[in-house]
Amino acid sequence: MPKLVMKFGGTSVATPDRIRRAAKRIGVEVSNGYNVIVIVSAMAGKTNELVDWVEETAPFFDAREYDAVVSSGEVVTAGLMALTLQEMDVPARSWQGWQVPVKTTSAHSAARIEEIPTANLDAKFAEGMKVAVIAGFQGVSPEGRITTLGRGGSDTTAVAFAAAFGAERCDIYTDVEGVYTTDPRISDKARKLDKIAYEEMLELASLGAKVLQTRSVELAMRYKVRLRVLSSFGEMSDNVGTLVCDEEEIMESNVVSGVAYSRDEAKMTLVSVADRPGIAAAIFGPLSRAGVNVDMIVQNISEEGRTDMTFSCPTDQVARAEKAMTEAKERGEINFHDLVADTNVAKVSVVGIGMRSHAGVAAQMFEALRDEGINIKVITTSEIKISVLIDRKYLELAVQALHDTFGLEQAA
Ligand code: ADP
Ligand code: ASP
Ligand code: MG
């Protein structure tokens, strides 16, 4: 029998009633002839609550116990979903990550899936089980400890199951109709896209569009999983969502497909470091070892052998970055006059595969920001994206302006 993966996010399983509504959709796919693998998230808000409890209990927590706690939200919804399906006479059972087992690395709180053996589930499908309900976001390390896959990780669980079981499709049910030209919560002009290329989705996700976890898009691209994002609310019939697919499947694409943003960025500047071979290694080596995810980097013009080095990282890693830099200075590896942290910045990016063949996107972006009087602090570009760091207070304005200037209101 063909298999389908259906993933339900937090708002789609927020209450027993919503779980029932999701279960009805699953029931329809079962009657369409599929064996269904359902991936569930924790109820909306639950994971945040669990994270808060961990941080309240132990500010410098043991990541293994963090995972033990925060993985529990999905355990509850998996059991409730299986019960709901059974109440509807659909043969179903729940599985926690370790029972499958979803084998991961031991990088607690950010583990990567390494293997999903199919034998256990397939044996149950062969016995007549119609739906396997899997607790998303979790797995088990080689040491036998519970792991989690990073925030938003149930998307990755879903795509990994779709790849492992050769599912016909992986449907991600969420609280919006699909992937939009920008976050529909920030702009009412945002338009739903019918299709988006893997590469564009990958950029949008990694630049902050949380509708899909970045890693899930990577896996979908690598294993050619047909990935669909759609709403778990509304009528089933007119609900086509957005297909994430190969570039070749998209007939006409806009130069820019979407605008993404990330609110929690910080800009750090090491003022007056010696401009010598090895200085970048001496700065970014310790930052990386301290677990700081450096994003943008700018080295300013050098004057009399000294230069300023600016980089960005998530706001909650500023303290860690400061500690790593101060310690490197104390060890005599680097020398700087000052370390300035600006935690009131945000990153706004435009993404589109059309940029490969179109010049002038950057100029148009900068002009649109200029017209709104928004100052650009840092710029980075790649083949299909341009990102800028700006004052956080201009975030919404910048997203709107870029959405307008690239005509995304007309996108489809
Ligand atoms: P779930 O709980 O279903 O996993 P998430 O909250 O993780 O849902 O992701 C869905 C949210 O992603 C939407 O509510 C929306 O605010 C946000 N989002 C950000 N950028 C986009 C975009 N380009 N298209 C659609 N949604 C987006
Ligand atoms: N519940 C987890 C989170 O909120 C995983 C997920 O929903 O994808 O991050
Ligand atoms: Mg999510």
Image (cartoon, rainbow, N blue to C red):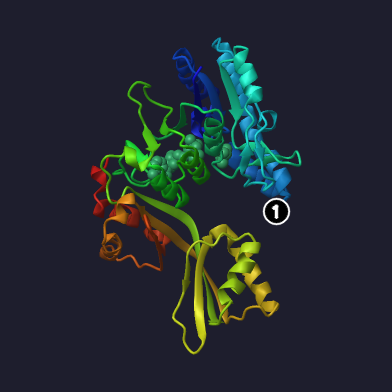
Q: Quadrant of the C terminus?
A: top left
Q: Is residue 219 above or below residue 15?
A: below
Q: Quadrant of ligand 2?
A: top right
Nearer-the-camera pick, 250 or 283:
250
Rendered view: 335 above or below 258: below
Quarter of image, res 156: top right
Total numbered circles: 1
Work out whether 128 lies above or below 390: above
Q: Quadrant of residue 402?
A: bottom left
Q: Amino acid at mark 1?
A: Pro
Which one is nearer the viewer's eye here, 72 or 39?
A: 39
Q: Is residue 50 left or right of residue 43?
A: right
The residue pinned by badge 1 equals 59
x and y, in percent, of residue 227 in the image: 44, 34
Seen at 51% across and 87% down, the residue is 305
User: Residue 316: x, y in percent?
Assistant: 58, 58
Q: Residue at x 55, y 82 (%)?
A: 276
Classify residue 391 as left or right of residue 142: left
**Residue 92, can we see it?**
no
Image coordinates for residue 327, horizontal then vertical, percent: 68, 73
Mark 1 C-beta to ligand 2 under 8 Å: no
Element assignment for label 1: loop
Of 340 and 57, which appears nearest the observer? Answer: 340
Q: Is residue 362 left or right of residue 227?
A: left
Residue at x 50%, y 27% (from the top left corner) = 167
- Which picture quadrant has residue 356? bottom left
Q: Residues within 10 Å of mark 1 (few under 14, many from 20)?
A: few
Tell me if residue 370 can be seen: yes
Note whether 26 is above or below 217 in the view shown.
above
Residue ranking furthest to the right: 143
